Amino acid sequence: MRNLRRGLLAAFIVAVGAVAAPMAARLAAQGLPARLTDTEFWQLSASMSEPNGYFRSDNLLSNETGYQYVIPELLKTTRPGGVYLGVAPEQNFTYIVALHPAMAFIVDIRRGNLLEHLMYKALIELSPDRATYLSRLFSRRRPAGLDTASTAAALFASIDTVPRDSALYRQTLAAIDDHLTHDHGFPLDQEDLQGLAGIFNAFFEAGPEISYSFPNQGYGYRGGRGMPNYYDLMIQNDGTGLDRSYLATETNYRTLRDFESKNLLVPVVGNFGGPKALRAVGQYIRDHHAIVMAFYTSNVEQYLWQDGIAAQFYDNVATLPIDSTSTFIRSAGGGFRGSGGGFRLGSLLSPMQAFIDDFKHGKIQSYFDVIQDSH
């Protein structure tokens, strides 16, 4: 009888353990918040940020037309539900709606990038659909005939025929300020509000033709000309013919709008090689039992190598919670070749854990090696 009781007890313990193990895994996976309060959002952004830094251009818009090509592979290799890290403005939106992270942090050396993301946040939350959003973003009255089934090409073609409207510009700018400072309660000071107004004014002045070279005249190809504009970027595809941009479909836009409305995209001011921002982001992710699923670095590493602080960046990355599925997304051009051979333009991928191991073992000695290590 005693042996029978012991056997039943052992079986019970095993059964409880079998139930408890996946339950513990689910609790760990649920460590990230489903939404942040406005206070939590602002405190995270402010506490993680470093002082405003310098970059040679404003980067109001991406210039990377091949940024979608890596998405099919990312969907195979990354684990959904982790945290997405990125830099710069709108290209992050497309990666976010494709990868479905539980949370995102955009870390950029320029406070202007944080302000641009707050501008986007307000416009997206205030606009129920893509046509209304583009109307407000470019300060042009919404054309007739657009609906939720309209393609990105149709949306931009229609908006492009409408003249800019200074009254709508003033009305929308006031709505942005009110939404951020009153609805959300973010304590933006006068300098921030002026900076945000300057960014929004650039979209008003240039309209759908805005590109990386506005207002960065003198940078880029052919003296600043020849850069893709907003329309060009939103009608790219992933190499299989599928446009995955955040404005490609109403579903994509609504996914981003829901993400923004839950305060899950947190902009942070920080140098990749700085002492605080990336490490603070990593600590938050670790504290919430999550990992970095993808880190979009654009071509920032090129400048870190030029400035002699690439090692500090990789030391920061080594403190992030990553695993074998965590992936760098890099932008490359100018004649670099990927490890698979062939002339490569656009975006490249690299497993973060393996890359950091290579760097620690002295296999990465230059930015050229960074690109060679990518594919």
Image (spheres, grey):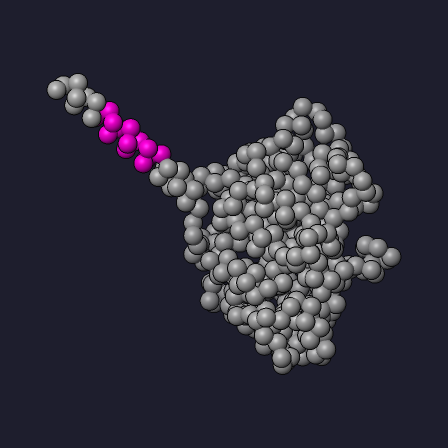
Q: Is residue 153 visible?
A: yes
Where residue 55 sits: x, y (%)? 72, 50
Where residue 369 sits: x, y (%)? 75, 33
Is residue 356 shown above or below 194? above
Where residue 192 sits: x, y (%)? 60, 61
Q: Which residue is found at the position 75% from the left and 67% from the top?
A: 209
For the residue pair 7 and 141, the one nearer the viewer reads as 7
Q: Which residue is found at the position 43% from the left and 56% from the top?
A: 37
Is residue 16 shown above or below 143? above
Residue 23, picture quadrant: top left
Residues drawn in magenta: 9-21
Is residue 145 shown above or below 278? below
Point out the residue furthest to the right here: 222
> Would residue 84 appear left or right of 305 to someone viewing this image?
left
Where residue 356 sits: x, y (%)? 63, 31
Q: Which residue is found at the position 47% from the left and 63% from the top?
A: 184
Q: Which residue is found at the position 66% from the left and 67% from the top?
A: 152
The total of numbered circles placed on residues is: 0
> Would residue 84 appear left or right of 307 to someone viewing this image?
left
For the residue pair 282 and 93, the one nearer the viewer reads as 93
Is residue 100 shown above or below 158? above
For the residue pair 126 and 353, the one nearer the viewer reads as 353
Question: Which quarter of the image is occupied by the C terminus?
Answer: top right
Residue 17 is one of the magenta-drawn residues: yes
Point out the residue furthest to the top here: 3
Q: Is residue 49 visible?
A: no
Question: Which quarter of the image is occupied by the N terminus?
Answer: top left
Residue 62 is one of the magenta-drawn residues: no
Q: Main secondary structure of the magenta part?
A: helix
